[in-house]
Amino acid sequence: EPEVTQTPSHQVTQMGQEVILRCVPISNHLYFYWYRQILGQKVEFLVSFYNNEISEKSEIFDDQFSVERPDGSNFTLKIRSTKLEDSAMYFCATSGDREETQYFGPGTRLLVL
Amino acid sequence: DAKTTQPPSMDCAEGRAANLPCNHSTISGNEYVYWYRQIHSQGPQYIIHGLKNNETNEMASLIITEDRKSSTLILPHATLRDTAVYYCIVRVDAGNNRKLIWGLGTSLAVNP
């Protein structure tokens, strides 16, 4: 069964550093999403991406965040200057069509010190 | 904010059916109900979804009331591996965008 994969599984970084989280979507999927989950809290929508541009972003997704699909396969989330409150699990999700089910990757656990 | 409310926790005996309720009284006519589950802090796993009709797949059944204001996820024969947090989600459709708005879910404990 096709799966969404994410790398790295864990990332520890110093406050103020840049991090890039990577996602490999299911083949032929065209709609991409990032969500995050702070420990013990709800899963929160960050951003949706289609046709090489952002479709929608939440209030959380400020100027420190960016997404791109640099090589036609990986879908990345960059946090330019990490803050302590960015510590969370970050989940990538993809779907084949706008109306289709979103399938989630295993997540990247980000810890900002 | 989430458009769904669920009990925070439930218990179920292994081998018995687990019935997880969800209220979504403000759901709009074209909004789908999705169920996902999350084991520990793993990635959310899709279970099932529906619009108006009851649905069944290899994992579960979804019963949606006629007025669509509530639904029930049924795991017919719960196993210990079904212990997880179960999320009932109304997918919010706005123009071309589709996003999942999550609540706190129901923590299901399947007991031996």
Image (tube, coloured by chain):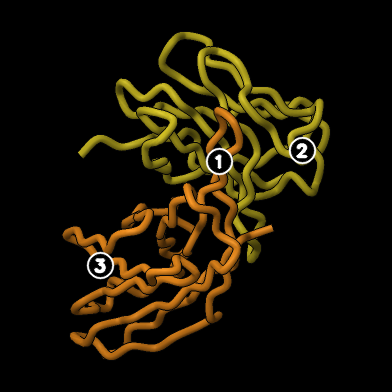
Chain colours: A yellow, B orange
Rate crowding at label 3 as few (under 14), some (14 to 19) or many (20 or more) other CA atoms within 10 Å: some
Q: Quadrant of the C terminus of chain B?
A: bottom left
Chain letter of the residue carrying label 1: B
**Left or right: residue B32 compared with residue A84:** left
Q: Tag count in the figure?
A: 3
Disc 1 on helix, strand or loop?
strand
Rate crowding at label 2 as few (under 14), some (14 to 19) or many (20 or more) other CA atoms within 10 Å: some
In 3D space, how far apart are the residues under numbered discs 1 and 3 (Cα atoms)? 24 Å
In 3D space, how far apart are the residues under numbered discs 2 and 1 (Cα atoms)? 37 Å
- In front here: B61 or A7? B61
Q: Residue at x 63, y 60 (%)?
A: B2
Where, by quadrant of the figure, is residue A29 drawn?
top left
Where, by quadrant of the figure, is residue A83 drawn?
top right
**In this figure, which residue is indicated by the disc labeled 3?**
B61
Disc 3 on helix, strand or loop?
strand
**Left or right: residue A1 compared with residue B67:** left
**Amino acid of disc 2:** Gln
Chain letter of the residue carrying label 2: A
**In this figure, which residue is indicated by the disc labeled 2?**
A14
**Amino acid of disc 3:** Ser
Question: Of circles 2 and 3, which is in front?
Answer: 3
Q: Residue furthest top?
A: A71
Q: Measuring from the top left, give residue A9's x and y in whole percent.
A: 48, 41
Q: Residue at x 60, y 15 (%)?
A: A53
**In this figure, which residue is indicated by the disc labeled 1?**
B93
Q: Residue at x 50, y 37 (%)?
A: A92
Question: Of circles 1 and 3, which is in front?
Answer: 1
Q: Measuring from the top left, give residue B75's x and y in whole percent.
A: 26, 74
Q: Quadrant of the N terminus of chain B?
A: bottom right
**Left or right: residue A39 compared with residue A84:** left
Relative to B56, residue A15 above or below: above
Q: Measuring from the top left, give residue B95's x and y in whole percent.
A: 59, 31
